[in-house]
Image: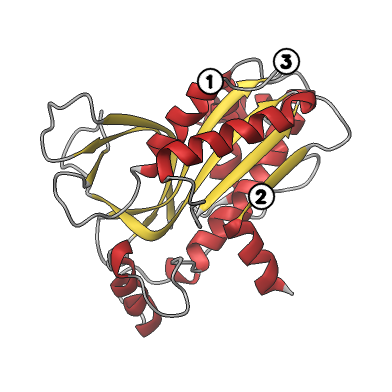
Amino acid sequence: MRHFTSQFEALFPTSRGQQVKRLTSPCSGTMNEPNSRQKDELVMSSVLENDEKGPNVYGDDEDTSAFLSAFQVAWKNCTTDYQSRLVNSEHTLQSALYFHLRNALDPKHFVLYTEMVVRLGEDDNETKNKSVIDLVVSRRLVDSNQLEVIGAIEVKFTPRGCPVKHAVEKDLRSLSVIRNRRSSEHRANLNVERFAGDETQVLIHRGRKMVIAALIDSKHKDRFDQHCNDGIEKVWGGRHPKNLVTAIAYSNGPIATDVSGAPIDRSLTESL
């Protein structure tokens, strides 16, 4: 296992001569004895999105903030990997992002999965309502073997252009199913497959962040933005989701990355 890790580290350097500082969370302390703040956070995470009230209607907390911070660092590292000729396909870009996120997040508290299967409804054999998410970041719930999704990422790799319109809409639609719903018919069921033993139950955090991340040619930024706006119109009826982040990595040009969205704006406001 160490040999495999060493090979991967050689392919995707985590930093240029510096050790990566993993992001932790106050929730990752004692697993058996949650403190009062942790208990309150677990109660809040179980509230359905339709019942959101109070000042923090977006469900932002320390873990979602840690995820966003780690993602921005990892996404910049992915751009460096591409410029260093280490990324040549969408699968390689997904692997690089997984690797850099794993190095940025505390493995005792955060769990990452690739290509997680999501189904709407209770019928496991239903295929028409099946989605596969490129990357899912979850947190371990205190005093439980359950996981809770705090971030979902869809990745696109088009260094000589930008993703086609229907592909962007498809990814946005896949991200949109990662939410809590009252109706069992429309409720998202997340499966951790290919594991022996008991099945791991995966819940959805009320403040989960959705990220569509694309490596594109800088000349096509306006076109990509339009594809995203058209997809939002189709999926959410034009109402821009308050937990959606758009991340662009440029294959050329002076700016390496451009990460934007309401969650980023809120984090910047809080840091002032």
Which image quadrant for residue 157? top right
Which residue ends up furthest to the bottom in the rendered image?
Answer: 36
Eye-nearest disc, 1 or 3? 3
Amino acid residing under circle 2: Ser
Compare residues 104 and 69 and report the one nearer the observer.
69
| Residue at 59% across, 58% down | 262
Residue tagged 2: 260
Relative to 42, residue 80 above or below: above
| For residue 6, side relative to residue 147 (left or right) | right
For mark 1, give the secondary structure. Answer: helix
Q: Which mark is residue 91?
A: 1
Label located before the other in sequence (3 or 2): 3
Which image quadrant for residue 92? top right
| For residue 172, side relative to residue 143 (left or right) | right
Q: Which mark is residue 160?
A: 3
Q: Position of residue 181 (x, y in %)?
A: 24, 54
Eye-nearest disc, 2 or 1? 2
Amino acid residing under circle 1: His
For mark 2, give the secondary structure. Answer: strand
Q: Residues within 10 Å of mark 3 (few under 14, many from 20)?
A: some
Amino acid residing under circle 3: Arg
